[in-house]
Image (cartoon, rainbow, N blue to C red):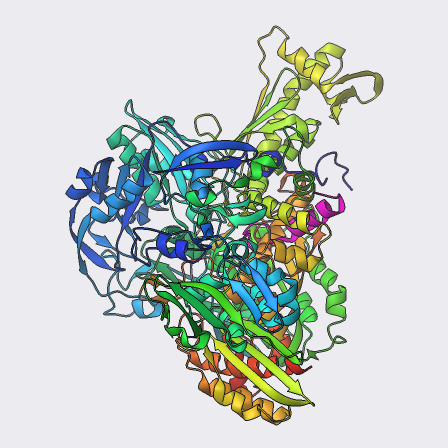
Amino acid sequence: MAGGTDLLPKMKRREIEAPKYVIDLKGIPDLDYIEYDHKKGLRLGALTTIHAIETSPVIQLRFSILAQAAYLMAAPQVRNRGTVAGNICNAVPSADSVPPLLALEAKLKLMSQKGERILALEDFFTGPHETVLTGVELLVEIQIPPLPSESRGIYLKLSPKRSMDLATVGVAALVITEDGLCKDIRIALGAVAPTPIRAKRAEDIIRGQGFSDELIERTAQTAAEESRPIDDHRASAEYRRWMVQALVRRAINQAIS
Amino acid sequence: MKQIKITVNGKTHELRVKPWATLLEVIRDDLGLTGTKEGCGLGECGACTVIMDGNTVNACLVLAPEADGKEITTIEALAQGDKLHPIQEAFMEHGGLQCGFCTPGILVSTKALLDENPNPTDEEIRRGIAGNFCRCTGYTKIFESIKAAAQKGGR
Amino acid sequence: MAEYSVIGKRLPRVDAPEKITGQAKYAADYSLPGMLWCKVVRSPYAHARILTIDTSRAEQLPGVEAVITGKDFGGWTWGFMPATRDEPPLALDKVRYMYEAVAAVAAIDEDIAEEATELIKVDYEELPGVFDPEEAMQDGAPQVHDHVKNNMSVEYHWNFGDVEKAFAESYIVREDRFRTARATHGYLEPPAALAYYDPAGSITIWPAKQSPYFHYRHLAACFKLPLSKVRVIQPYIGGGFGGTKNDSLAGDFCAVMLSKKAGKPVKFVYTQEEELTTSRRRHAMIVYNKMGVKKDGTLMAIHSRVIADGGGYTAIGPLTMYLTGFMTTLPYKLPHFKHEAYRIFTNNPIGAAMRGHGITHTRFACEIQMEMIAEELGIDPVEMRLRNAIDNPEPGTRYETINKVTLKTCGVKEAIKTLSEDPIWREKDKMPKREGTIAWGVGLSGTSYLSGARLMGHQSCGAMVRICEDGTVNLITGATDCGQGSDTVLCMIAAEELGVALEDIDIKRVDTAYTPVDPGSYGSRVTVLAGQATKLAAADAKRQLLEFAAKTWGVKAEDIEIKEGIVSVRKDSEKTMPFSRLARIASYSGSGAVIIGKGYSGYGLEPLDFSSGIGNGGTSYSFTAQLAKVGVDMETGQVLVTDFVIAHDAGRPLNPVGAEGQNEGGAVQGLGQTIYEDFIMDKGKTLNPTFLDYKMPRSTDVPAIKVIDIITDDPDGPFGAKEASEGSIVSTPPAIVSAIHDATGIWFKELPITPEKIVMALREKGEY
């Protein structure tokens, strides 16, 4: 447990069996850091709080899509305790930090007594609340490769209320431009599939092309088709699909404006 | 049972607590400081907001052993004896409270907000207390109180 | 124009110092030595027969000191009226809504109490449930109660004038179906109490109740004790808003019964999830409204048919359904009115009162329908309202509706005119209609609410004013401040009447052993009725004091006045003394005089008949006109409400800060129930019982709110007062719905208007 802002409510609501032991990770030294190097990129220790990410000058400057997500998460008291690592490992499909991290092509460093392994974030989730973490592994670091300066990322969170709310749909779009064309694009979606996903078919449509309204629309539409939302008490699948389309369109337009 | 040492409002206490007790329970039941309230127990309402090592947290989501060695500030520390904190004065003058149940949490969050940002914009005020739910006031007079406290140099 | 020393001034709340320092004690903050913790066992089924309950394992758990089931209450049931006593403290033969309480334990700590609840084995026979009121009304539907047919909890049929003839003579007749949200009070403080049953035969309890005297009667009846032996001591209360904290709950009865069995004090505190799944809620209602209007916009007739989801028990249902109709004849002149009200039992949580009560639902339907008709006729919304609104009666006269609702002041026309001159209304046609994906709209509403609720049955309300020998004053009243600020306004009334400063008046929490009876906080009655009692009590005390002054100075009492703490003879500037001196003279006069003034509210014995809808449900009526400005994101359906302007006729706001706060708070609750709040139910199960998922407005969701006072000085309220706490929750939903229509061209008739509903409607319209 790092911040405990997901674990404790689950325990209190009896959503999980009462654990025999809860291990407080905060006692482990050297796990709370934000390190940037223009060659290696960004490294976040597992105990980095959401508040630290929201307010970090280097993240705001160079990886602002992640700071945008942190800004939109929960409320001050929760951001002060909660960690992005916890948000990732909690593995809810609507986790706000994950679509931006997917768009940033983040990797995770997992450690166990047997050693360590590096895993693409994309390969981490297997289903709602399910990850590839074995029972003896710990997420210790989040690694984000450096980005060229012509990149711009936008995270949009759709929720009825403007704070303290869950994403009905989360859209992250990271666009790298060169000579006015789309050199590269990464689109990631949250809350519209069993896990957060990259919308790779959508990306293929506009990658290498110019940013015409028509292409952006087709990209957005394809992203909507790639999503696999369900009906639940918060929203219907149909609405979520339309919102993917609307938000992807918006995010790309904002990224290139 | 676990042995912990916490400093609350400047006083250090050595306590024996159940490992699953929350900081909120310790503050209210072991230390008798009932100003901090339980609203939802899930970190969604902010009624239990305290300052721990300089940051606001929901005490209902902090296990007592996690608070070992920490400095906690609760609502009871805002006034200095008879003398009210400028934030408290502002809330009293501008009617920033009705039933008062959310008020301790709101005042603690306001203190943290103004300590970090002495001249917040309207938007920053709204965001600063977004973790504190109020059902009575509609927030209007809370905003006015916070603005007035900021103008008074309310730190 | 009256000049007051205290009334109308912007003063701090009398309870602010305790609340801002964290010293105010709420029910959960109380403890007694040896106290036990109570936890409640709840049914996992919405409708089931209870076959057996085995408590043996729980009883054997070390630390458990008492366990009770429904049988311990001997078959006793309670209810709002003698004929509706259908609710047991713990379920007996059947459970009728999910998580209804069936057993309770008391243990030495919370953890053991919780563990004990898991050891209680209940055998249920699940029964088919019914969850939709219209389905429940049909023959063959599962029956929630055996003593009524078709799950009919309450049924009223009223008829005034001739609606059919009026419809025939109308130029436009509209019929629409409206639906209001499944909403709840959402107070932050979960229900709680600390109870002690003294073996000598008395109860002391510190419960979170906004009507302590209702609770004291319930306990006296349940435990067969005389009222004098039931002591309800009111803690500070963390919000009420009518409904649950007016009523008694399983936790209350169980804490007392467990205390009786264990011989120790027992405390219970509901979790917020318990609160959101099992406490009383606002009724969700379907309103079939038919309205007929002449070509010039004159309202001819309304025929309303209301179907309310009553949930498992009756609770305050009879009053709720009465309120759905009796004020349909306000604020617009209505010559013909027919009303059919049905409250239906279902296996959902219990529907009861909430701020605005039954009036919110039908006023919403009528306002929107009137706007739809205005649109069809091409009449401006302001004009439409002004043509129909009731005029402010001339002083000394009153207006009477067809169902014998009478009023002496009515500021609705002035309120509407004031808003028509507000920049937001004036500029609405000049402002950009569309900015990117945001469509802007402005809406108007004109509504009314009752003030000083008069119910049937025992509604006594008294106050005492005790003059201390140093000139300070104790105000002793059974009126309950649940946060709305009534303690402050009652102290202001006492101070004004006596001629002293607000700081000189002290008021404590209600204690049924010492404070005179008062029904508590509901129906916007405290300022008007307890205020009247307070004013009379203060006047009584003043009269007694003035006798002493008259004797001291050898003048007539009527020549003496008290103002701002100074007693003086009107035409003789030599004869003055401070109030404190007069108090001492009176107290030490050697005659044994103890200066206690008393007064009670004479609320009148005019007829009031729920089954025919005739008579005054209130002492007076407030009027509210409201503007709402909204921006609708036409792609996502999200609604941003940027401005409310509320023009409220409260007669005279005695405590302006308090009245504004009430208008602001009520409007934001109304906002919540218009676009955000709804319990999503699945066969009796609440799917969203958390603050995260039952979406109440946070600080980042609320508009800028401006409150404008419309002064009408009502003769039936102390210093001209009428209510200021519920009007804005009635005026807000129609104003927002009207604004959303202005922005999108769509009339929404089902609340809440979620982003998804907006997008669906835009798609249907072909505008997406």
Residue visible at 50% across and 85% down in the picture: A223
Q: Is residue C293 visible?
A: no
**Magenta segment, which residues?**
B131-155
Residue C435 is one of the magenta-drawn residues: no
- Looking at the picture, how far across and down is residue B39, in whole percent? 46, 48
Foreground pick, C342 / C208: C208
Quadrant of the rendering where the C terminus of chain C is positioned:
bottom right
A197 with respect to C433 (left or right): left
Foreground pick, B99 / C283: B99
- Looking at the picture, how far across and down is residue C86, in whole percent? 29, 49
Q: Is residue C758 above or below residue C468?
A: below
Q: Is residue C582 visible?
A: yes
A233 with respect to C605 (left or right): left
Residue B139 is one of the magenta-drawn residues: yes
C569 with respect to C371 (left or right): right
- Looking at the picture, how far across and down is residue A130, in whole percent? 35, 69
Residue furthest out toward the top: C590
For residue C65, which quarter of the picture? top left
Residue furthest out toward the front: A115
Q: Is residue C598 above or below residue B5?
A: above
Count of numbered labels shown in the rendering = 0
C315 with respect to C701 (left or right): left
Quadrant of the rendering where the N terminus of chain C is positioned:
top right
Residue visible at 66% across and 26% down in the picture: C504
Foreground pick, C184 / C379: C184
Foreground pick, B18 / A145: A145
For residue C152, which quarter of the picture? bottom left
Q: Is residue A54 above or below residue C545?
A: below
- Looking at the picture, how far across and down is residue B138, in whole percent? 60, 54
